[in-house]
Structure formats: C-alpha cells, structure tokens
Image (cartoon, helix red, strand yellow):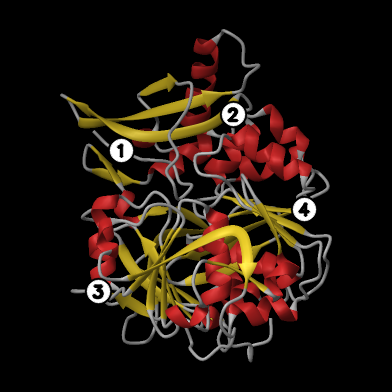
Amino acid sequence: MQPALRSLWEVVRSAGAPSGRFLWGAEASVDIGALAGASSLSGPLDELRGRAVLIRTRDQLSAALALIELDGVARRLVLCPHDLADEHVPYVVDAAEIDALVVDRDAPAVAAGRAVVRSSPQLTAIRGERRAGEQTEWVLLTSGTTGAPKLLIHNLQTFAGAIAGFSATATSQVWSSFYDMRRYGGMVLFLRGISSGGSLVLGGVDEPVASFLGRAAARGVTHLTGSPSLWRRALMSPAASLISPRHVRLSGEVVDQAILDRLRAAYPQAEITHAFASTEGGLAFEVTDGLAGFPASFIGRKGGVVELKIEDGSLRMRSIRTAVRYLGPNAPTLKDADGFVDTGDMVELRGDRYFFTGRRDGVINVGGLKFYPEEIEAVVNQHPQVRMALARTKKSSITGSLVVAEVVLRENAGGNGQQVKDEILQLCRGALARHKVPAVISIVPALPVGPSGKLLRHHE
C-alpha cells in the first residue's frame, strides 16, 4: 500500500478492482469491481460526510462494505463487533459522539434523532461523490475491566505498516479469517486481502466451524488466520482436511510448539507464521521460522517501524502502528512518556529466544506461588492425544487453591482416559516445577472460546 493513499477506497482501487474479485459473506457476495459505480448504502454519501458514524451490523459483509465506502468520507467510524451487548451501545454512542448510524437490521433505540442508513450486499447506483476529504478515525472496541468496552482510535495510516507489501500481487489469492473483521486481528487480515488484489471469505455470525471451513474450501482459500484456540478447534473438525491454504497465520494468544507442529503436519504445503499484535499497540512482529517464541534480537532494535523493550518482564512497544489514543470519559493513558505501550504480555528469555508466558493480569496463585496458566497448557498440549488444554485454579481447603487442567482429546484417543491422564501427569512432572503440576486432570468434550478467539478463562 502506498502511504499517500487517503482512503480505503483508494487502496481497493490501487489494488485493482476488476470483475471477479469478491467479498464472500455467509449468505451473500459482492463483486468488488462493482463498487466503482455502485453503493451498499441506502442513502447518499453526503448524508454521512463529516459525521461520527456507528457501524452496527450483524453481518460482517455489510460492515466491510460500509467501511470501504465511508473511510475518507465520515469523520469517525465506530466498528461494533456483532456480540457487543445492547446495554453497552448507549455508552459507545455517547463516548464516540455518534450522530449517525449504519445498520443492517432494526436500528437500536439510540438511533432516535440521528441519521440512519442501511448497508446491504444488494448494491444500488451510487448516490453522491466518492471523494476523500477526511482522515477518518476508525474506532475499535476492546474489552474493559468493568464490562463496558474501551474505545481505541486507529486510522488507515496506523494500519499501513501492518499491510505493507501486499499491494496488487495476485488476484488468485483468497484470504479468510476465523476472526471478526471488526476486531484488530480480523481487520489486519481484511486489509491485507483488500490491498493484495485478492478476494476474501468472511465468516458468518455464530457459523459452525465445519460450515465456515467448507465455504473457505469451496472458494479456494489461500491465506487463513486465527488464534491458536480457533486453529485447535478447527483441527478437531473433519472439515479441516477440505482446505489447502498456502499461508497459515496465528495471533492473539500464546503460540506453543504443539500447535505449530500440528499445523505443519496438517498443511505441509503452507507457510506458517505467528504474529504478535494488540489492539492498542498494533502489529509488533511476525515469526516465520516454525518455532514458538521469538528471537531475542527483536528486542532493542533502533530506528525501525517498531521498537521493542522488556520492562519488569512485560513486552513494551513503540510504533507508528500504535493506536492514536483511547476515546471517552476517563480514558486511560495509552503510551508512557517515551511513547511505549505496555502490552501486559509477559515474556521469559530462554537461551537466545523469548517466550510468552501469559498475561500479567492472568497470573494464578497456588499456596503463595504465582505463575501463568499458559505455561502449563504449553506442556499439556504436547501430548499427542490432546487437542486443547485449559489450566485454571480450584479452591482447596489446604492450599487455598490447586491447579486443574481440563483437556479435550483427539477423536481416536480411545476409551482409556486414565492412561492418558497418567501420561499427561508424567509429562508435566518432567517439565514443570512441582507447584505448577496439575493436581486434577479432567477430560472434557469442549472448551469455550470467546468472540475474540481466545480461551475463556475462569478461576474459582
């Protein structure tokens, strides 16, 4: 992508928008070339020019079309994931000073007194001039500690570094993601696909994994991204054998060696990359050597797009890809005095490589000893019969709490669950300090994964 481009529509146009490039949704599709003379919006563009617009659609495709059309036109666009609770919408509307909405269903109550425009894959003749006069703020939502989301301002330029190098290379590329494109990881994938000259397959709301993989296979997906948990869940499905991607990407959670090896076995033809990024800090780096963790040489480099340092065990980053600021009343400070964002992701140096150990706010405590559940999961996941693992604590009358490991086994694991439990226990005893070894190992049919693609964690 060229830095001089002023709007997402110019990115689409510069990548070429010939007939035959598609945005495929779960129920409809749009030929990207048709956008040159048509619109997904029910009203003229000028009705939303210079406004702060909430994009509140259930369907990813409708949201994607609205973003393409309104970047450079609207002053601010708030991208709401479909799972944003209705109770939080008034807060988002007030914090972002929303004066117009784009919807694909009934408008929420907060629409009263505000302009409302519908977005639909059923394109109509464009109404109004498509010209970029604004550097539109893209507001992404991230979870807050009180339940209400935090609002982060990005824009096309903060994403520019994350999608650099993908300009109009191959119209045969088909991109897709397990993520919602209204979240940071999904947005990076969406923009890379749009800027590459390829097509995209967008997921449906609450779409079963098998259905999504089947659609991705039917469209010939070449680039597919998701969190380790989402990839583990995908590999449990027989439909995983339907796809044959050339590029597999992981992000959003700690990437252990087990999931990298299993993806390599499942897709030997694919380039497998894992990336570290956050909604606040943007994309920090990508690792392509097939190994968990990242080279220690990434830390301390000066003068690049991204600078990384470790402070109190936490990875910090300074980058042109970082969000502009938080939005709303009592908004927290995003960067320190030197411009670094504290990611809250804890790392540990082992030899010449750093490994992520967990989130600072995810530490668990057993008998006064603190550690991260991801350390245990990385070991448990090494067992060949384990598909997914979740470590948590459970109340104990003796130590106050003890470690429990919940595991999902392979379909062909057989009925000898106790033998597998014993083997997992031996594996943990050989690799973990005594206080980290699970006291209880439970075999479960599934583990919950949240809308962001991460394991849902709970501690008793």
Disc 4 is placed on an element classified as loop
Q: Is residue 324 left or right of residue 184?
A: left
Instruction: Say few, some or many: other residues with alpha carbon within 10 Å of mark 4 (under 14 / 14 to 19 / 20 or more).
Output: many
Picture disc at residue 312: none
Q: Nearer the viewer, residue 303 or 351?
A: 303
Which residue position holds label 4? 222
Q: Is 130 left, or right, of 243 in this rendering? A: left
Which kind of residue does numbered mark 3 sit on?
Gly
Q: Earlier in the sequence, mark 1 or mark 4?
A: 4
Identify the disc placed on residue 383. 2
Give how far across and how far down residue 105 sits, in percent: 43, 52
Amino acid on which the number 2 mark rests in the picture: His
> Label 1: which residue?
458
Q: Secondary structure at mark 1?
A: loop
Q: Could you tell me which residue is drawn at 59 percent across and 83 percent down?
A: 130
Bin the neighbour count of mark 2 within 10 Å (Cα to Cα): few under 14, some 14-19, many 20 and up.
some
* Placement of the C terminus among the 4 image quadrants: top left
Q: Nearer the viewer, residue 411 or 141?
A: 141
Residue 275 to residue 95: above or below: above
What is the spatial separation of the Cα atoms under label 4 and label 2, in whole angstroms?
29 Å
Q: CA distance from mark 1 to mark 4?
A: 35 Å
Q: What is the number of the mark on residue 328?
A: 3
Mark whose residue sits in front, 3 or 2: 3
For marks 3 and 1, give the CA distance. 29 Å
Which residue appears farthest toward the left when viewing the image? Answer: 397
